[in-house]
Amino acid sequence: MLNNEATKYIWHPFTQMKTAAPPVQISRAKDCTLYAEDGTEYIDAIASWWVNIHGHCNEFIAGKIAAQAQTLEHVIFAGFTHTPAIDLAKTLISILPDHFAKVFFSDDGSTCVEVALKMAIQYWHNQGINHKTKIIAFENAYHGDTFGAMSVAERNAFNAAFNNYLFEVIHIPIPTNENIAALKLQVAAIAANDDVAAFIFEPLVQGAAGMLMYEPAHMDELLTIIKAKNILCIADEVMTGFGRTGKNFAIEYLKQQPDIICLSKGITGGFMPLGVTVCTQQIFVAFYADDTAKTFFHGHSYTANPLACAAANASMELLIADKCQQQIQHISTRHAAFARNIEKHIFIKEIRQRGTILAIELNTAENSSYFNSIQTAAYQYFMSNGLFLRPLGNIVYVMPPYCITDDELHKVYEVIKTSLDYLSQ
């Protein structure tokens, strides 16, 4: 029963408030360590929902935010602009594949997906092509918690209460060696009437689904068919962006490129909420007109907030530096070695790894699911051993800040290794 003072006033996300354990009160954090009010320390091995890519309280990012706060804290972004936003847009365009041209600012992962969906649908509408309205998405998808994002996600317990309010979406399986031939035929049939506006996908890793992974070659085959059918492609890199898969963006593994990309989470290094949707010049041109009705009528009060942009500029500067790029490769190598070391354990059903993302699917009597009962026992075991991991049901995953040390990684691996024997009893 939650009964401490915090929960007297606060409703926590993804939490059944009646039955959940009391939340741990964190008083401060530094690099990969969370310091609780009672003095307990935890290694934050999932970068606090995947956002703190450079660790907590990074001095460089904090300094840039402090300096910006003395100059310009916020200004409406309709009719005004500012240097932090301009600099960030230029940097993003420079490190993304070179077919991207325009950056649209929003607030977080869900809203940058909403922007992408609206952008894709209005792209056709602005050209008088009103029959292209259908959306294709992957099974097991998760794209956020707003209504458009829920609509393109898997229909499950998370959005069951809202199913009658969600727009229709055609869901297809992720491509595999076994299904790719049939999947291409399926997509061709779906697109036969030329009424599909867009296809949205999480490139190479479906995060909330349990870190499900698929191969770039298969995705390229699928995208070749989809793009040939005159369908806009939206890459949701809210989770995979900014180095998580071993490259700055997961789409860098692909030959076939999306028309729109959604970015958030690690963009500010975990300091400030910010989302961006980046599109090609071709999409932008469909809105660039004398006709006011073709305007993209979307915006938020905190669009392109200067403090958030300052944080993002600092985070991008750290990301593209050699030190961070080398650390990303180092973590990837360490993950791969650890995976080989434990892959034959009887309690492991499958290990998946790409870049700094390592996922261990536990071999339980229950089916793999977010609601697998092993989740609570696993979480408690990790926390009791000074390790913050938040399993997705029976999927234990590691996605650490890039500043994690070898000693910290060693502890993460050792605690996971001992947990396999403990949890399988």
Image (tube, grey):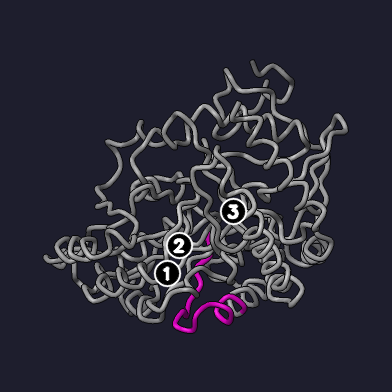
For residue 358, which numbered disc appears in the image? 3
Tell us which disc is closer to us: 3 or 2.
3
For residue 316, which numbered disc appears in the image? none
Query: Which label's residue is closer to the chain start, 3 or 2?
Result: 2
Question: Does 252 sit above or below residue 4?
Answer: below
Quarter placement of the N terminus: top right
Question: Does 306 sit above or below residue 161?
Answer: below
Distance of label 2 from label 1 (alpha carbons)? 7 Å
Q: Name the amino acid, label 3.
A: Leu
In the rendering, at what x and y percent does residue 3 appear?
69, 16
| Viewer-closest of 115 and 128 | 115
In the rendering, at what x and y percent does residue 400 appear?
68, 54
For residue 204, which numbered disc appears in the image? 2
Residue at 56% over, 47% down: 344
Residue at 58% over, 82% down: 94
Magenta stretch holds residue 98 = yes
Distance of label 3 from label 2 (alpha carbons)? 13 Å
Q: Dots 2 and 1: beta carbons under 8 Å?
A: yes
The local secondary structure at tag 3 comes to strand
In the rendering, at what x and y percent does residue 408 appear?
79, 51
Residue that label 1 marks:
216
Question: Does 240 sit above or below residue 286?
Answer: above
Q: What stretch is highlighted in magenta?
A: 91-106
